Amino acid sequence: MAYYYTKTGGTATGDGGRATTQRTGAWNSTASEYYDSVVDARGATTQPGDGDFILISDLHNNTDSTTIILNGGGVDGGAGLFLVSVDDANQENYKPGATERINSGNGSQLDLGFSGMMAGINYETTIDATSLLRANSATTNLWKFIDCNLTCSSTSTAILNTQKARSNFVFINCDMTPQTECFGLVQDGASIYWYGGKLIGNHPINSGTGLDGGAFIYLEGVDLSDVAGVLIDEMLTTDSLGNTDITLVRCQMNFLVTLPSDTDFPFTKTKFKMLSCDDSFGGGDLFRFIYQTGLGQARNNESVFVTANTAWGETSDKSSIEITTVAECNSREPFIVELPIAQQYIDLASTSSDILRLPITTTLTLTDTEIVAYLMYPDGTTSIQPNWVTSGATVGTGNYGTDPLGAGSTLPTSTTTWTGAKTNKYHLELDTTGDPGQFQAVGVRLEVYRPSIAVNTLMIATEFEVL
Amino acid sequence: MAWYYVKNGGTATGDGGRVTTQRTGAWSTTASEYYDTLGDADAATTAPEDGDFVLMSDLHTISYVGGFNLNSGGIASGDPLAIISVDDANQENYKPGAEETYTSSSIIPLHKMFMAGISLTCDTSLGLFQSTTTINSLRAIDCTFINNEAIAPKIMVTNASGTLYQFLNVDIQGYFEIDGYNKLEWFGGTLLSNLRSVLFDGPYDERGASIFFEGVDLSSYTGSLMAAAHVTNTDRLDIKLINCKLNSSLGLPALADLQYINHTSRMYGCDDTTGDELFNYRVQSGAGLVTNNNSKFTDSSLKWYAGSTQSSYEVITSTLCNPLHALVFELPIEYVDLSTSDILRVHLTTTLTLTDTDIAAYLVYPDSTTNVHPNWVTSGATIGTGNYGVDPLGAGTTLPVSTVSWTGALSNKYYLELDTTGDPGLAAPISIRIEVYRASIAATTLFIASEYEAI
């Protein structure tokens, strides 16, 4: 393990700014003992690599004219290269503030090899480039950024291009200012996690997504309120074979944001989820629950709801889940809402709470081969034993799938009181009396087989009725 | 849209077994109106493709040399080709039962496929479903898939990128070879047997893989859950089993079998036939392993389901674990009213002296006045404001001492505190994320309570 010290004005060359014992106290006043830039530290005779630290004074403010590869000499599974901004007055302590700019090059400015971590650093490209960061063409394992400001101040520049199988990125409390999309060419099975921070400017989260194996993108607690236009740009659709999964949890949205449409996704294999997100006005609960694939969308609707249901959060809003499907939806390729749409703690061991009903209101006449709820629950006497029930029309015993050929029977009529009810009221019934369960958190999987369900025609309650 | 009819004994050739109006009632007694095999139907003059149905009598049973492509005329975005077993007495009705066996061969599904109620058997190491670059998805309901090959009884080989295999109530004999960021989802059904000693085989390269089983009976299987995922291949690998029935002798991955942090294996609510909650919670990555431990627990914690077992979560970390390669896992969701119970403590007992840069808890929760606004708190040592990551250089401060009562307590008792009083929250279902940065935490040295204390 070695430490490479970097601060504007340093004159170190070779291994002059490299130490094998971490320095403490105030920054060294001898300029030959620290490098002038990350590029210079990277160019040390003994190049920094796995397990090493490039420690940068929080007062550091430098502009480089060279694009670089970081940790290109690392190894798979190596400890990673750490670039950390430290307190100039007590250099053993972490303190955000170091600034590096790159004003040359037109590809990707920082080429991230193998593994590494940046903490407390402001990194900026001041010229037009493909991206500020990119996965190294051959090696990237994992790069993690904490408390960083990542900025593209010229045109046509994304923050990151993944474009490489096995590349993984984690951003924690990072503010990012792209000029195009934030993450470009997210494909080849790449994964991106972003916890906290802000996307600055009206730019999409990602673009060029889904090719060659798809991608995984997860944002939690990120402020996306500047995004008043397209949220997800250029999803690769029908020609893509990729499995892509994009999830936003508790993110702050702009009410003008343009969400992905049905046609933005290949049918079954791309999933877009928004959970507990909302717009900057709060209380509107506009984006509380969205689950979308290329076959359809489930989304909270605040104007139609079961009157007895519980309100959201601090507001008085109540919701239903509105379902829409595309023309291609059918029993062979259904719209599946995988997440629990009505998760509640229910005592399935009690004979007074072992039948669950999920109320529906709709303008359609619906049958039990058009929309089906599935419940998997642990057995009442042997919790190892997974029991299944379904509201769908099944054939034979033990078959959890719904009859793929039957027209089905019209769903049972419901008498539940709705606000904004449609012409028909039904329920999906999950009857566990034949195989008792336990007291547990219950969530259902919903499968919708009916094609072309239009907006404002089908709403599902957010809570079970328990009998 | 067209219908192709298949029952052994059929003599149809060309388009003889193909119709454009679905038949009803009893199966045709004219053999020239239906094909003898699925392969014969596939070889029709107008081959079945996207949106067509191949309907097989539930009495159909035949063995022959397969090796044919299915839906070769389809396109990536088309409707699936459906292959469905139907009632011989009322052929418009679905009825499971049709069987095909392929000798020294199997089949090659292309584009999108749907199967219901059929049993397919093969005996080749090429896999029951041979993948190509043009397979897109295969969804199967109420089916039985068997590979009798003695050495490598693969059900499928997912060497194309991004394939989705989705099985509902499917019984399987064989194992899964997965890579190419393919997804395998299996809801209900039974692993009949596996002639090989590994269930999920790699190499998980070329973009990794995603595997999700829910309510699957794996209790007859005593081999290894998965082949090792090597550090030279850091593609994302995500294996998750929920409420699956396991054998107590199942070979779980060793610490060295997942060598990078995006290699993950998770089990929630699984158990063996003894019902002792052996596999109720198990989260593993290349950075370490978390398992429910039933001999150490806070005395006030709840029991699992109807049983009498209480648990803690035992934490082990690998040599790879550090602030970059943290061991990350989520505690089970609890519903907490943060407007009244605004301090949460996660208790732990350990033989180690732990600091707030060795292990940290994180909570994202909705703001009490504007629930759009996500608030963050952490128990870890942070610098400045708003930074949710833990100080990457600091040695940290020893964690605060806990006084809660444990069964099986170790020498030290600490807690991780999440204090939301500075920015009040709401009543909400919350999930606490734990990150462990300390390397080489050995077995039986660190246990985390299964429930938070709300103050």
Image (cartoon, coloured by chain):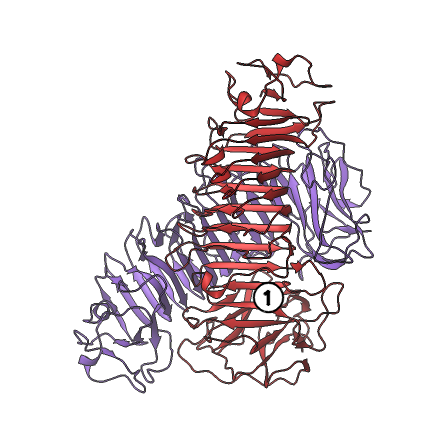
Q: As drawn, is A8 to the left or to the right of B451?
A: left
Position above or below: B226 against B305: above
For the point 50% across and 15% down, the residue is A45
Residue B250 visible in image: no
Q: Nearer the viewer, residue A50 or B284?
A: A50
Q: Amino acid at mark 1?
A: Asp
Colour applied to chain B = purple
Count the labels in the image. Answer: 1
| Quarter where residue B78 is shown | bottom left
Residue B100 visible in image: yes
Q: Rate crowding at label 1 as few (under 14), some (14 to 19) or many (20 or more) other CA atoms within 10 Å.
A: many
**In which quadrant will I find the N terminus of chain B?**
bottom left
Q: Position of residue A70 (x, y in %)?
A: 51, 29
Position above or below: B453 against A353: above
Q: Nearer the viewer, residue B190 or A194?
A: A194
Classify mark 1: helix, strand or loop.
Answer: loop
Q: Nearer the viewer, residue A310 or B263?
A: A310
Q: Position of residue B417 (x, y in %)?
A: 77, 44
Colour applied to chain A = red
